[in-house]
Image: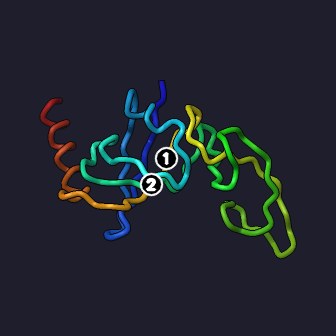
Amino acid sequence: MAEFQVVVGDPDTGNSYQFTVEGKEANRFIGKEIGDEVEGKLIGLDGYTLLLTGGSDIIGRQLNKEIKGSAPRKILITDKSGHKNSLRSGERKRIIVRGREISEQTSQINTVVSSKGKISIEDIVNSTEETEEESD
């Protein structure tokens, strides 16, 4: 059974929020690709639409929007973009990345809000935290 950490970035406030998704809702993410839009209802954000912008797998390899499928591939990078260690001028490096499709090996999905709902994300997060505290 798939389980994902979904990170939602709110461009208006600059805040990001983390949600854990498992079960049926997590299975609905499988097969989606970077650049696709999903309903926020899958993670408890009713009325929101989220744009998939990236992610990483269980080991920490990043998803690459230029590679089809979900399999890991070796690519040659020549600039600093998307790599944690800076490259010097003229330097090239071969790294392993995953394709743009979300699979069961994906552990984190990065999203950004593309259309807002009626209630702010902060209010939704605070109300779910209060209900969890009451149930404990």
Which residue is found at the position 36% from the left and 44% from the top? 19
Q: Which residue is mark 1?
A: 109
Vertical arrangement, residue 4 with respect to residue 13, above or below: above
> Which residue ends up furthest to the left in the rendered image?
134
Relative horizontal placement of residue 59, taking residue 115 as reference (left or right): right
Which residue is found at the position 15% from the left and 30% from the top? 135
Residue 33 percent location from the top left of the image: 55, 47
Judging depth in this view, the residue of 3 and 40 nearest the camera is: 40
Determine whether the residue tagged by mark 2 lies in a helix, strand or loop: strand
Q: Residues within 10 Å of mark 1 (few under 14, many from 20)?
A: many
Which residue is found at the position 21% from the left and 50% from the top? 124
Residue 47 percent location from the top left of the image: 25, 52
Vertical arrangement, residue 103 with respect to residue 124, above or below: above
> Which residue ends up furthest to the bottom in the rendered image?
89
Q: Residues within 10 Å of mark 2 (few under 14, many from 20)?
A: many
Q: Which residue is mark 2?
A: 111
Asked where in the image residue 70 lies, by quadrant, the reply is: top right
- The amino acid type of the residue labelled 2 equals Thr
- The amino acid type of the residue labelled 1 equals Ile
Relative horizontal placement of residue 23, taking residue 69 as reference (left or right): left
Asked where in the image residue 14 lies, by quadrant, the reply is: bottom left
Counting the numbered discs, the total is 2
Residue 52 percent location from the top left of the image: 48, 53
Which residue is found at the position 40% from the left and 31% from the top? 22
Report how far apart the C-alphas of labels 2 and 1 lie in the structure.
7 Å
Q: Where the C terminus falls, by quadrant?
A: top left
Determine whether the residue tagged by mark 1 lies in a helix, strand or loop: strand
Q: Look at the numbered discs 2 and 1 and tell me whether their residues touch, using CB distance below 8 Å.
A: yes
Relative horizontal placement of residue 103, taking residue 91 as reference (left or right): left
Vertical arrangement, residue 13 with respect to residue 67, above or below: below
Label at residue 56: none
Asked where in the image residue 84 lies, by quadrant, the reply is: bottom right
